[in-house]
Image (tube, helix red, strand yellow):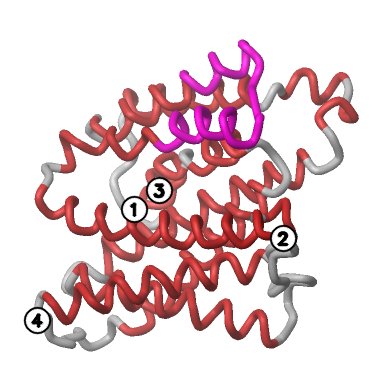
Amino acid sequence: AFDNGTGLLLAVLVRSATALLILSVLFVWQRKRLRFPRGAGRWQLLTGLMVAIQSLCLYSAVARIPVVVALLLMNTFPIMLALLTWALGGPRPTLRATLIMAGILVGLVVVLDVPAWFNSPQALGPEWPTGVAFGLGAAAAFAVALWTTEHHLGQVGSTLRSLLTMLTVLAAMMVAGALQLVPGGMALPVSTAGWVGLTALALLYAVGFSVLFISVPRLEMSRNAPVMNIEPVASLLLGYLVLGQMLSGTQLVGGAIVVAGVVVLSISPR
C-alpha cells in the first residue's frame, strides 16, 4: 500500500474504521451496556491517543526499514513497560527480568547491525536512523497505553474499551488529515496494487484485532502470551515472500534473540 502512494494517515484511518465497525457489531451482539466509571474518561482518551501515535510511528518505521526490523523494535515494549511501571512507583524489575532485557537489547544491536552502521552509515541508507527512531517510538507509545489500561481502565469493559480506543484513533486521524499535519498523509493509492494493499491492511487488521479480542478473555495469558510474539516471525516470512525483504544471517540470529527474550520476559515474574 505504501509503495503505491497510500498516505500514512489514510492507512491508519481506514484500518481503524474497519476495526471500529467490527467492534461495534460485537458490542451490540453481546448486548453490552455503555457503563463508564467516573474519572476514567481522560485515561481512555490518553490510551486512544497513545495507540494512534503507536500506529503512526509503526507505519512510519515500516515505510523506511524492513518490516521485520520495525516489528522487532516494536516488540521491545515489555522492556519499556517494566521500566515505566518502576519509574511511576511500581515494583522494580527482578534481576532475572533485568538480565533478560539486557539480552533483548544485545539482540537488537545485532539485528540493527549497529557496528556496520557506525563503520559505514551510507550502507544502510539515510532512512535507517529515522525508521529505528519511529520503531522505538511505537514501542514507547504502546507501553504507555498498556500502563494506562492496567492501572486506570481496569473497571472498563474490554469491549467498550477497545471500541472507544479505535474511535479515538479514527477521530485523531481525521483531525490530523483535516489539519494536514502529515504531508501527503491522506493521499489515495495510485494503482490497483495500492488499493488491494490498503483493503488487505484494513481487513486483516480488523479480523486479527477482533479474533484476538474474542480469544484473549478465554485464554490464560500467563501461559499463552508467547503466542503474541509470533508477529515478527510471520512478518519475516511474509516480508520475504511478498516484499522481497531479507535479513542477513547475523541479523536473523539477533532477531531470534529478541523474540526469545521477549517470550521469556512475558512469562517470567517481573
- Marks 1/3 in contact by CB < 8 Å: the verdict is no
Mark 1 → mark 3, Cα distance in angstroms: 23 Å
The circle on residue 39 is none
Q: Position of residue 80 (x, y in %)?
A: 46, 45
Query: Does residue 36 appear to the left or right of 43 in the view shown?
Result: left
Q: Position of residue 58 (x, y in %)?
A: 58, 52
Which residue is located at x 72 percent, y 24 percent?
Answer: 114
Q: Which residues are magenta?
A: 231-256
* Residue named by callout 2: 191
Q: Magenta segment, principal secondary structure?
A: helix
Q: Is residue 142 above or below residue 240?
A: below
The circle on residue 208 is 1
Q: Amino acid at mark 2?
A: Ser
Which residue is located at x 28 percent, y 85 percent?
Answer: 39
Mark 3 → mark 4, Cα distance in angstroms: 33 Å
Mark 4 → mark 1, Cα distance in angstroms: 22 Å
Q: Amino acid at mark 1?
A: Gly
